[in-house]
Amino acid sequence: MFRSITKVSKSTNLKPTVISNASSTRMYSELKGTKTHNNLKEAFAGESQANRRYLFFADRADVEGHTDISQLFRSTADGETAHAFGHLEFLEEAGDPATGEPMGDTESNLISAIAGETHEYTSMYPSMAKTARQEGFDDISEWFETLAKAEKSHSNKFTDALNKLRASQ
């Protein structure tokens, strides 16, 4: 099996580089359901969250006038993105780590995105909003309700894109 794997270079700028690995013969579809599969999903989630946190921290550092620290956070966030992409490349044949849907080509990726966004606006955010309201966090409940509307819009946009893609084929 021939795989192209994203690796993070050891340089200080943490830019991803692509290498080829033609010697790997194990099918990654065998990965699904293994502890390694779960570890990759957990690592992907952690790297993705670190990326977003560091970008948030960078914005705060900018507001406080610490441009050098902001740049450090942004540079490290880029590295975390490269790590997350590397995990996704291994996970690709086992399915989207968030939805379990197949991923890879644009049509599959749109279907997976629709599944994820639909879950968020029909189940996840409404449930979270209900809990927040029951616990007296009305402002957080309203935030979750706002996000549910945004996720529905995302789902609709992805659905439109999928329909256009299919019509063009």
Image (tube, rainbow, N blue to C red):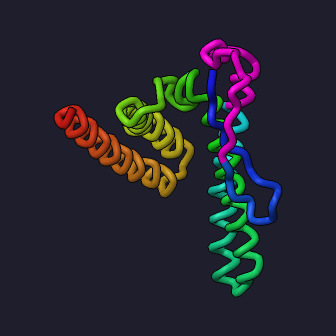
Q: Position of residue 124 (x, y in %)?
A: 47, 35
Q: Give the range drawn in magenta.
A: 18-40
Q: Where is residue 75 in the image (x, y as percent from the top left)?
A: 71, 66
Q: Where is residue 162 in the image (x, y as percent from the top left)?
A: 27, 36
Query: Horizontally, is 35 left or right of 135 in the view?
Result: right
Query: Horizontally, is 150 left or right of 48 in the view?
Result: left
Q: Residue at x 53, y 29 (%)?
A: 96
Q: In this view, does 142 lie above or below 68?
A: above
Q: In this view, does 73 lie above or below 167?
A: below
Query: Horizontally, is 35 left or right of 115 in the view?
Result: right
Q: Does residue 25 show up magenta in the picture? A: yes
Quadrant of the rendering where the C terminus is positioned:
top left
Quadrant of the rendering where the N terminus is positioned:
top right
| Residue 74 visible | yes
Q: In this view, does 71 lie above or below 95?
A: below
Tell me which corner region of the image, top left, top right, bottom left or bottom right, holds residue 120: top left
Q: Where is residue 164 in the image (x, y as percent from the top left)?
A: 20, 40
Q: State the count of labels.
A: 0
Q: Residue at x 68, y 53 (%)?
A: 16
Farthest front residue? 22
- Along the line of sight, the residue nearer the viewer: 131 or 125: 125
Q: Which residue is drawn at 40% across and 38% down?
A: 117
